[in-house]
Every structure is written in C-alpha cells, then in structure tokens.
Amino acid sequence: MEMIWQGIIAAFHLLVTGDPEVIAITLLTLKISVTGTLISLFIGIPLGTLLALKSFPGRRFALSVVNTGMGLPPVVVGLWVSIFLWRSGPFGFLDIMYTPTAIIIAQAIIASPIIAALTCAALQQTDPKLRLQIQALGTTRFQYTWLLLNEVRFSLLAAIIAGFGAIVSEIGASMAVGGNIQGQTRVLTTATVLEVSKGNFDIAIALSIILCLLAYAATLGLTLLQQKQQGGP
Amino acid sequence: MLEAREISWTQDHKDILRNINFHLLPGECVGLIGPNGSGKSSLLKILAFLETPTSGLLYFQGQPVPRKVPLSIRRKIAIVFQQPLLLNTRVFDNVAIGLKIRGLSKEIIQERVNYWLEQFGVIRVSKQLALSLSGGEAQRVSLARAFALEPDILFLDEPFSALDAPTKECLRTDLAQVFKATQTTTVLVSHDFRDVVQLASRALVLLNGQVVAEGSPPELLRSPPRGEVERFLAHFAS
C-alpha cells in the first residue's frame, strides 16, 4: 500500500516539476495520436459513406470485413505493418520502421475500420424519407452526401471519440513498429510498460495519469462540442 | 407544364400504376385523390422524378424527360411530404438550404427565407432548432422551404395528414391564400377530399393504380361515377 502511495506522490512531483522526458513523451504521444486519428478520418468517413449509400457487388462482405476490423487486435496490426515495413518487406525501401511514421500508419489502420463502421451505421439509421427529401431539394450527389453527413454529425463525433480512444490506448502496434526507442518512438503506453518492468512505479503511475488525462481531455473536448451542437442540457 | 403518357410502374412483380395519363397546366392545382394503397403517392414520386416509371413517358415544359433526369429539371420542382422532414439545424437554415445549394447570394437567401417564414407565420421561430418545433409549425417551415425555391411545380404529398384537425384546418386556409396569391402550379396528393375541394381546381381519382375519374372537385362530389368511386367519395359528401 505504501508503495502505491509513494508512487502517487512521486508521480505528482514529476508532473508538477515538469520532467523533460515525461513532457517529451507526452507531446510525441499527442502528435502521433492526433495525426493517426486525422488520417483514419480521411479513410474511415468516405469508406463508411460508400458502404452506407452505394450499392455494389460484395458490399455486404466489405461491410462485414470493416465491422470485424473494429475489433482488430493492435498487436496483429503491429505484426503485419512490421512485416510490410521490415527492411526486406514490400515497403522496406521507405526506411520508416521504428519511426513515429510507422506508429501513425499502424494506428490509422486500427482506427479506420472503427470510424468507417460507425459512419456507415449512422448513415444507415437515417430516415429513408429524409434522404428522399434531401434528394428532392435538387442536390448533386456531393451535396446529398454532405447534407446527410451533416445530419449525422453527432454520431460522427462519437466515431472520432472511439477512434481516438482506440489509438491513444493501444500498445501492441506501437511496441511492434515503434520499438519504444527513447527520444524517438517512446509513447505513453510503451513507456508505462517499460517503467513497470523496471519496477519504477512512480514514473509508471505518472505516465498512466498523464495518459488518462490526455484521453479524458480529448474526449471531453469532443463531447462538449457534440453536446453544444446537439443543444443538449 | 407537365405531362405523363401511359405511365406504368411495377415494383416487386406488383403493378402499382397502370397506363396513367396526366397533364398539368401552368398555374393550376390538381388533386390526386384515392384511398390508401391506390397509387397516388407513387404517381407523385414519378411525376416529381423521384422514381423512374417501368414504361411511359414524361414531358416537362413540352420536352421529353430523359431517364436520368438532369439537375436543371430537378431544381425546378419542390416537394412537401406528409412528415416535415426538417434537417437537424435551425429553422432559418432549413429554409435556406435549397437556395444555398443553388448558389444564390446571401442577400437573396436572407430576403426570400424571411419572406416565406413570414408568409407561413413562423418567422418568430426562425432561430430555433427545427426539431424543437410542434408538428404544425414544422409543416409550415417545410412549406416555406418549398415555396422559397420558387418552383415551377410544387408537389404536396399528404401535407396535412399528420396534423390534428384544428391545425390542419388553419394551415389549409393559409395555404389556399398563398396559392391564390402566387398561382403556383401544384400537384396535391391527399386521401381527404376536403383538402382537394379547398385547394385544387381539378381532381383525379385513383383506384388500384388507375385513374378512374376526373373533374372539378365539386362536380365529382355532385355526380360521381357509380361504383367504388361513388362509395369512396360518399364519405366526404357531407
């Protein structure tokens, strides 16, 4: 019990004094997670829209693959991205293994199916009569899609929250493709695991508190935006 | 303005519409009347280019309408459905949306939206969220949205049927005044002949996907064709 208490005290000390390494890890985590989320938005929203609104052969199969992707284990993503980015792999010439870029790619692969599946579900839940009404307003295909996406914007924000949550909390992929290299690819999750393995519970607790605060701050911001737009209490 | 020749529509191996001939003159309001399942809403969707007929031809302003209806034609019509079907945004933006997608200037949008909200008595709620309105208010906003487009043809698909009796009566009276002032060419679908009597100058009665009677609404009430049409219209004789 005393160890936990001392760990918490040491953690707050690290946080208050602004330990340079902890700050660097936090900023890198933020940069990687935000970039990964943004990329997954650019992939996930158009993919989800296509699956929801366009009829084509194999659509149901594609949807089932995307839905399965929602539960894709990060460590599996890490393994396959490693195979592709490995020096002898198909994309080895890019020489980005064990870099933040590799982590971003892996994390975007983790979050894209989540955002795509939730976008698709949100669009499919819209009233078919409302879709007809939007069409009847004289919309082009792009305007029609844009208005429908705007109509489900609260669900899209929930999808973004879910995508960011999956990215910021994963460890398997970051460890596999980033390698947890100090000052280069060490992020909050991998650093926490490392410190636990070394028995440095104070630093591990400090990192875990920051990770939780980071996740909370980001989701709080998105939630407030969602509720403000929805006119909630 | 609009003409349909020998329109038929089959869906899931079922004949919804059979050999319908229809014409609409500029400035007139034509009522499509019939019991539930008679095919009147299906006919409206075809006339409004929301569905493609299985066979038959449509002519808009004298020109045949291609199967893939061009945007320039689709933008000349407006539709109001039974439900208001407003977007989850403010009332003003709901009425403005059709004008925005047509690329009109801010000044024109502002002027036109306010004018039509005023005409339908809902200007006071223009800043409210559309989904917070009552059924009557929402349907007025829906009508304002359609009229703001200044369409060549307005299609009304059971616009009063989701409203309670007093609200319906009030809105029908207001709409009659707007029709009188604007002379908007309109197709009105209703299962209630009273709507047609008050608003339309001509009525077509549909039964089982076919037009079985046509004439001025009072004339149809006075001397309906014998059989099913007579029985259907008898409900409204009083």
Image (cartoon, helix red, strand yellow):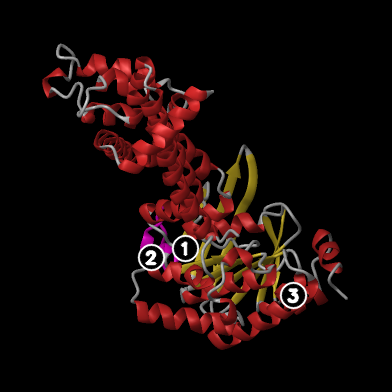
Q: Nearer the viewer, residue A97 or B171?
A: A97
Pick whichever, A133 or A44, lies toward us: A44
Q: Which residue is mark 2?
A: B101
From mark 3 to mark 1, how far is it between C-alphas? Answer: 26 Å
Rendered residue at 58%/69% (across/down): B142
Provide the chain ID for the residue under circle 1. A
- Name the residue rendered at 28%, 37% in the picture: A19
* Residue with the most extreme top position: A88
Q: Mark 3 and mark 1, same subunit?
A: no
Pointer 1: what residue?
A: A137
Do marks 1 and 2 share a chain?
A: no
Secondary structure found at label 3 = helix
Which residue corresponds to mark 3?
B167
Q: Check disc 3 and give the amino acid type.
A: Thr
Element at label 1: loop
At mark 2, the secondary structure is: helix
Q: Is residue B237 above or below residue A42?
A: below
State which region is magenta: B60-74
Position of B114 compared to A26: left or right? right
Tell me whether the residue at label 3 lies in contact with that at label 2, contact meaning CB atoms closer than 8 angstroms: no
Q: Is residue B190 above or below residue B54?
A: below
- Mark 1 touching mark 2, by CB under 8 A? yes
Which amino acid lies under the numbered mark 2 shown in the image of this protein? Ile
The type of residue carrying mark 1 is Leu
Q: Nearer the viewer, residue A56 or B210?
A: A56
